[in-house]
Every structure is written in C-alpha cells, then in structure tokens.
C-alpha cells in the first residue's frame, strides 16, 4: 500500500512538473507585439451550434492577434467540459514586456486579476487593452493547439463569441465589448482556428 501511495505521489509530481514546463512563460523583448485591437463583427441573426446537450448561439465573429498574458486550465467547474481553458490576452501596450513587468497578473475561478504598485499606463488602458476569454475549442486539432500555447507567445484566434445554454436552464453569456470589467465581462469564445508564434 505504501508503495502504491508513493508511486501515485511521484506520478502527480511528475504531471505537475510537465504541466509547468509546457506552460512556462516565454520571455519577449520590450515593444508592442500586438498593436491591433480584436476585430469583431456583430451578427444580427446568430447560428445555433450543438455541443452535446449545450446549445451555442453565435453573437459575433471574432478575430484577434494578442499576447497571451496568462492561462488557466479547468477540469471540474460547471463549464469545464465546454470551455476547458481561459486565456488572459493583451494587445496594444498590454503586449509590451516593459509595461507588463510592472503589472502582476493572475487567474482563478474564471476571473483575470491584475495589480500594480504604480501605473505604467492608465488604468482604463489596462482594462480596455486586455481581457479574460473562456475558450471553446471547435475540434480536437484546435484544442491541441490551444493546449500548447504558452504565456508570452503571440496567439492568433478566430471564431465566434457565443452564448451557451442547456435544457435544464443553465446559461453562460459572452461579453460583447472590451470596455467592460468585473462579473460578466469575459468573452465566451468558440475558437475555430488557433495559431501561435514566439513573436
């Protein structure tokens, strides 16, 4: 029994080390890496997509190139089977290493948090040049691409902002703007294409 417990502990430690290694941050030189804001085209008539018992309603087409600031993977919360990962993304000066060195960034419980001692750029610019996005991979190829993305990388994502619902009344709504903050400000992003690069 002791050997089994020891083996299980070693396995857990090894998996944790592997996860850290795969998702370790990539260092970038100073400068704005992703100058453009996300491109969004709102849809008057959305399309319904079915993912098991979850119905997705497309609200807008979204395409962006941004710096991956932080990522958090989820396995056990109510939305984990639909959106197994969250990306905190930054563009404009929120993709500049010199600015980000003065901002502490973290994620938990589906939220993205930042903290500064002194503002390197205005508060409102931090709020409108970064976002936490709940990612729904369209297929296994997209999921594998997302799983290998590391903080610090430039990522290019394309797909749809969606609202999600189940017959039992469960609902999950997307934000439709980058100007909001707090509860309800995250995007629910159905990702159909995902690429990353060092710069």
Image (tube, rainbow, N blue to C red):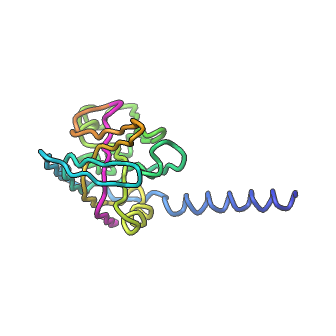
State the residue in front, 17 or 50. 50
Position of residue 81 in the picture relative to residue 156 (left or right): right
Q: Taking 188 as reference, is 53 left or right?
A: right
Looking at the picture, how far across and down is residue 189, in whole percent?
30, 50
Residue 142 vertical position relative to residue 120 in the rendered view, above or below? below
Magenta residues span 182-199
As drawn, the residue found furthest toward the front would be 167
Is the C terminus in the top left, top right, bottom left or bottom right quadrant? bottom left
Residue 107 in the image: above or below residue 6: above
Identify the residue shown where x is 38% and y is 46%. Answer: 101
For the residue pair 63 and 149, the one nearer the viewer reads as: 63
Pick out the residue farthest to the bottom: 141
Observer able to see residue 55: yes
Asked whether residue 162 is drawn in magenta, I would say no
Residue 134 lies, in percent from the top left, at: 37, 47
Whether the magenta-drawn stretch holds residue 189 is answered as yes
For image coordinates 14% across by 47% down, the residue present is: 45
């Amino acid at each position: 029994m002791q050997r089994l417990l020891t083996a299980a502990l070693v396995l857990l430690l090894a998996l944790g080390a592997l996860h850290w290694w795969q998702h370790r941050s990539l260092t970038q030189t100073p400068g704005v890496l992703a100058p453009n804001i996300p491109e969004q085209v709102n849809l008057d008539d959305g399309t319904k997509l079915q993912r098991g018992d979850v119905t997705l309603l497309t609200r807008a087409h979204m395409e962006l190139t941004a710096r991956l600031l932080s990522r958090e993977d989820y396995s056990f919360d109510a939305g984990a089977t639909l959106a197994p990962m969250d990306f905190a993304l930054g563009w404009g000066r929120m993709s500049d290493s010199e600015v980000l060195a003065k901002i502490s960034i973290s994620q938990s419980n589906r939220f993205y948090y930042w903290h500064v001692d002194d503002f390197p750029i205005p508060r409102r610019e931090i709020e409108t040049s970064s976002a936490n996005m709940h990612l729904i991979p369209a297929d296994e190829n997209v999921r594998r691409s997302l799983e290998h993305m590391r903080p610090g990388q430039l990522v290019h994502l394309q797909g749809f902002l969606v609202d999600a619902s189940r017959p039992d009344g469960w609902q999950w709504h997307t934000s439709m703007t980058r100007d909001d903050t707090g509860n309800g400000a995250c995007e629910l992003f159905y990702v159909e294409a995902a690429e990353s690069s060092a710069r």
